[in-house]
Amino acid sequence: MTAGRAIELAAAVVLLAAGLYFYRRPRSDADKADTYGSQGAVIMFVVAAIMAIHALGGLDYHPSAAQADLIRERSQ
């Protein structure tokens, strides 16, 4: 894992922790009816998941054998 990917993975973990905090933070007495979450926290979860998948290489391009052969033929 490169340093850039490690930093990206660490940022994803920080976003996930921040999302958990915002989702589960204590509410004031006026907000007791709404005991869970916010839309911002859910967006943070989604962004953290996408960042983690990208940092772990899940979105890298891996050509199939046929595509690799085609690329090699065209480059000659």
Image (spheres, rainbow, N blue to C red):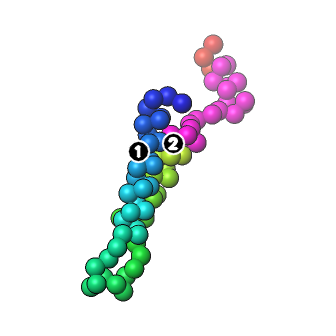
Task: Give the position of the N terminus as an image quadrant.
Answer: top right
**In the depicted structure, whether residue 51 falls above or below residue 44:** above
* Cβ atoms under marks 1 and 2 closer than 8 Å: no
What percent of the width, then of the height, locates residue 34?
Answer: 37, 82
Task: Give the position of the C terminus as an image quadrant.
Answer: top right
Query: Residue at point 32% right, 76% down?
Result: 27
Residue type at numbered disc 2: His
Residue wearing tag 1 = 11
Q: Quadrant of residue 67?
A: top right
What percent of the width, then of the height, locates residue 12?
Answer: 44, 48
Is any atom of residue 43 visible in this view? no
Residue wearing tag 2 = 54
Query: Residue at point 54% right, 46% down?
Result: 53
Q: Left or right? Give the position of 71 relative to 12.
A: right
Earlier residue among tags 1 and 2: 1
What percent of the width, then of the height, locates residue 65?
Answer: 72, 30
Query: Residue at point 63% right, 24% down?
Result: 71
Q: Residues within 10 Å of mark 2 (few under 14, many from 20)?
A: some
